[in-house]
Image (cartoon, helix red, strand yellow):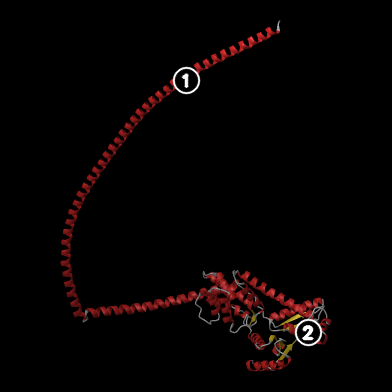
Amino acid sequence: MEPWLIIVLIVVALALVIVCSIIAFNLGVSHRKRTAESLFGSAEEEAKKIVSDAIKSAEAKKKETLLEAKDEIHRLRSEADKDMRERRSEVQRQERRILQKEESLDRKLENLEKKDEVLNSKVREVEVKLTEADEIKKRQFEMLERISSFTTEQAKEYLLKNLEDELVHEKALKIMEIEQQTREESEKKARELISQAIQRCAADHVAEATVSVVALPNEEMKGRIIGREGRNIRTLETLTGVDIIIDDTPEAITLSCFDPVRREIARIALERLISDGRIHPARIEEMVEKARREVDATIKAEGERAVLETGVHGMHPELVKLLGRLRYRTSYGQNVLKHSLEVAYLSGIMAAELGLDPALAKRAGLLHDIGKALDHEMEGSHIEIGVEVAKRYKECEAVVHAIHAHHGDVEAKTVIACLVQAADAISAARPGARRENLENYIKRLEKLEEIASSFDGVERSYAIQAGREIRVIIKPEAVGDDKMVLVAREIVKRIENDLDYPGQIKVHLIRESRAIEYAK
């Protein structure tokens, strides 16, 4: 076939295809148009149908709502009518009741008026009878006055006087009977309370001595304690204020001092020096200082133990320390701390039996002699010092008053104060608790030390040799060697004027100057 023919055929075929495509496209467009028009028409009809249905439904709902509203209005009207009928009936019932009450009141008023008339008539009758009785009574009194020769007033006075005399006599007899019974019962009850308290609190009492004995391992130790030219024993006596007696007693040394604290410090220091074996002045100073610290710790521990044993809580720490100092204080041969514990126990027992506060009674009994821990250092009696100390450390008024009144310096105004007085007397009255001579001896030595310590430039002072010597430590920076003679003379004059003592007293002043340096 010819090429041109093929090309022609191809062109014709392409033209046919194009024509067919155009025709098919037009047919599709017209079909879609018809379909869309039909769909649009059905949608409009559907919308119209929906709108008409909605209108019909709204009309029906409106009619239904109107019917319901009419029903509700009818119901409310019916209820209102019913309520009004009920209220009307209630009002009618109330009106009937009020009418009935008015009728009843009218009847009662009529009855009262009748009773009033009856009572008025009876009152008139009673008045007439009273008038007649008064006339009869008057005639009787006149007759009695003629018979007794007494007027009415005289007869009344006579009867009252007789009655008063009888009452006074009976009253006096009754008062005497009650007083006697009360006295017998109170004495019996007091004896029971005191005997019970004494039985329940059987405290120990110890007769304190003014000497302590230190055992030695051998006789050679006496020479070591004395030291070369007596320097060791002089150092120990100077530092402690204790008189060390070394005699023929085998393997023993006696420490003599009226102050138990100083004696205890010397005993501990000497025992440690003996056990250590190194005895020289420097070592003695070290041991004395350690012993002093140990005694201070013991004082604190003793105070705490006393507080715990008695169950007294909330006490100031300084008061606890002062209580511990009483461990080394004696009064007429009686240990003051043990005495205070005994008084606290007795006061607590008696307070509990009487229904009072036993804790407060124990507190007052424990602190009643607290001034004795400071009476060496302050002016005044131990009662005044105790009151001042108790007030300083915020003790309650009841405790302060009990301290002030326990020896009768002021009148006891509380039962607690009376109990402390009784407990103090019971404790002091135990056999062997009081010895006058020892107390006077100790007071004389304390007064001797007080006189020496009152001068300017005196660091401390110690009465030794049973009061026949006083050793005075002078501050080297305050008093020179020349002035020491004058100070010694003044102390001697003061002792001669203020003290009564047997024999003579040696006043020994010690002044020491030290220069200490350390080689590094």
Q: Position of residue 43 (x, y in %)?
A: 46, 21
Residue 270, quarter of the rendered image: bottom right
The CA distance from mark 1 to mark 2 is 141 Å
Q: Amino acid at mark 1?
A: Phe
Name the foreground residue: 159 vs 334.
334
Identify residue for label 1: 40
- Say which residue appears at 60% left-offset and 13% top-offset: 18
- Say which residue appears at 23% left-offset and 45% top-offset: 95
Name the foreground residue: 489 vs 456.
456
Q: Residue 235: give its label.
A: none
SS of the residue at dot 2? helix
SS of the residue at dot 1? helix
Report the number of discs.
Answer: 2
Left or right side of 243 for 144: left
Identify residue for label 2: 233
Nearest to viewer (mark 1 / mark 2): 1
Residue 291, quarter of the rendered image: bottom right
Q: Is residue 30 visible?
A: yes
Give the quadrant of the N terminus.
top right
Give the quadrant of the C terminus.
bottom right
